[in-house]
């Protein structure tokens, strides 16, 4: 499991992980609406970057290093031709 952002590690308001190859915003308050928080599974790195942008728009703290790391991984995948 890879951790990109978590309240414990970098004071983030979100918890973003990659588990079993899937990017997930865990217990996402944006996904929940008025109910209990639900996980938001992103369909790839660009989708997660967009999702995290929405978190910042509503005032959630998403650490810069999460964006940098995701963009770096996306660039690495693009260079390898995996996309």
Image (cartoon, rainbow, N blue to C red):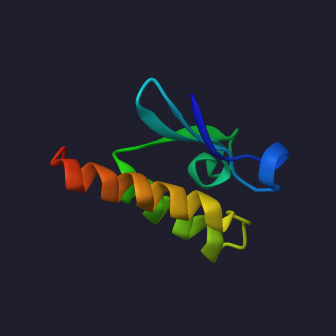
Where is 39 relative to 5, above or below?
above
**Residue drawn at point x = 43 percent, y = 61 percent:** 71
**Residue drawn at point x = 42 percent, y = 33 percent:** 22
Q: Position of residue 46 (x, y in %)?
A: 36, 59
Considering depth in this image, is 9 or 54 the residue closer to the camera?
A: 9
Numbered label tally: 0
| In this rendering, position of residue 52 left or right of residue 9 | left
Considering depth in this image, is 83 or 56 the residue closer to the camera?
A: 83
| In this rendering, position of residue 36 left or right of residue 43 | right
Considering depth in this image, is 24 or 40 the residue closer to the camera?
A: 24
| In this rendering, position of residue 60 left or right of residue 3 | right
Q: Position of residue 76 (x, y in %)?
A: 32, 53
Where is 17 relative to 44, above or below?
above
Residue sitting at the far top: 20
Q: Position of residue 54 (x, y in %)?
A: 55, 68
Q: Quadrant of the N terminus?
A: top right
Considering depth in this image, is 37 or 83 the residue closer to the camera?
A: 83
**Residue drawn at point x = 59 percent, y = 57 percent:** 66
Q: Position of residue 79 (x, y in %)?
A: 22, 55
Where is 54 relative to 24, above or below?
below
């Amino acid at each position: 499991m890879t951790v990109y952002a978590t309240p414990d590690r970098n004071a983030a308001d979100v918890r973003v992980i990659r588990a079993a190859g899937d990017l997930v915003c865990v217990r996402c308050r944006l996904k929940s609406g008025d109910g209990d928080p639900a996980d938001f599974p992103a369909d790839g790195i660009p989708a997660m970057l967009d999702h995290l942008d929405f978190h910042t728009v509503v005032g959630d703290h998403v650490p810069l290093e999460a964006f940098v790391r995701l963009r770096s991984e996306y660039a690495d995948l693009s260079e390898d031709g995996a996309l």
